[in-house]
Image: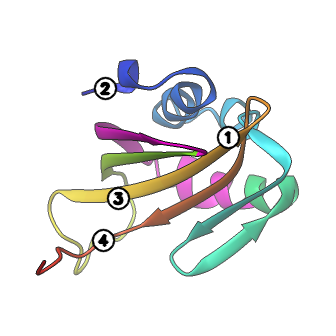
Amino acid sequence: MSTADLAGVLAENIRATNAADLEAILATYADDAYITDASREIRGKDAIRAFLSKEIVGDRVSYEVSEVIERPGQTIVRAVTDGLFDKTALPDPLVLTHYFQVVDGKIASQITILLKESPY
């Protein structure tokens, strides 16, 4: 699976992230967007820019999309994630699940979670 399984702004977001292109990544978010990542909520373009600059572009995060699930009003993207961040105590491979809501062609919300395997 690849970004070819994604369309529009989500494909551009993944492409720009893998290219470490801060301005292109930022352009995929709505002005009032929020990102929830590692139990933190990052709201608005200024905060999102700072987060992306330090923790995504700065850490050279890259995604290899492994699954895309379309739901009404939501796209779920699972991706093998790599980068220069501290990987201590993280699984290998690191698969993060991103829950996106897109409104008017821009990402309105993104929730990123490291899921644990369910016993059910």
List x then y, in percent, for residue 96: 35, 58
Q: CA distance from mark 4 to mark 2?
A: 20 Å
The Cα atoms of the two marked residues, 2 and 3, are separated by 15 Å
Q: What residue is shown at x 62% (from left), y 78% (from top)? A: 40
Earlier along the polypeptide chain: callout 2 or callout 3? 2
The x and y percentages for residue 30 are: 82, 43
Left or right of residue 114, residue 55 in this image? right
Q: Which mark is residue 2?
A: 2
Residue drawn 37% across the image and 41% down it: 69
Q: Is residue 58 visible?
A: no
Going by the numbered disc 1, the residue's amino acid type is: Val
Disc 4 residue crowd, few under 14, some 14–19, many 20+, Cα 10 Å:
few
Residue at horizontal 32 percent and vertical 51 percent from the top: 81
> Circle 3 sits on which residue?
96
Q: Residues within 10 Å of mark 1 (few under 14, many from 20)?
A: many
CA distance separating discs 2 and 1:
19 Å
Q: Secondary structure at mark 3?
A: strand
Which is nearer the N-term, disc 3 or disc 4? 3
* Magenta residues, start to end: 50-73
Dot 4 corresponds to which residue?
Answer: 115
Left or right of 70 in this view: 57: right
> Would residue 43 be found to the left or right of residue 118 on screen?
right
Residue 10 x %, y %: 56, 32
Question: Which residue is under mark 1?
Answer: 102
Structural distance between the alpha carbons of marks 3 and 4: 7 Å
Are there few (<14), some (14-19), or many (20+) residues within 10 Å of tag 2? some
Amino acid on which disc 3 is placed: Leu
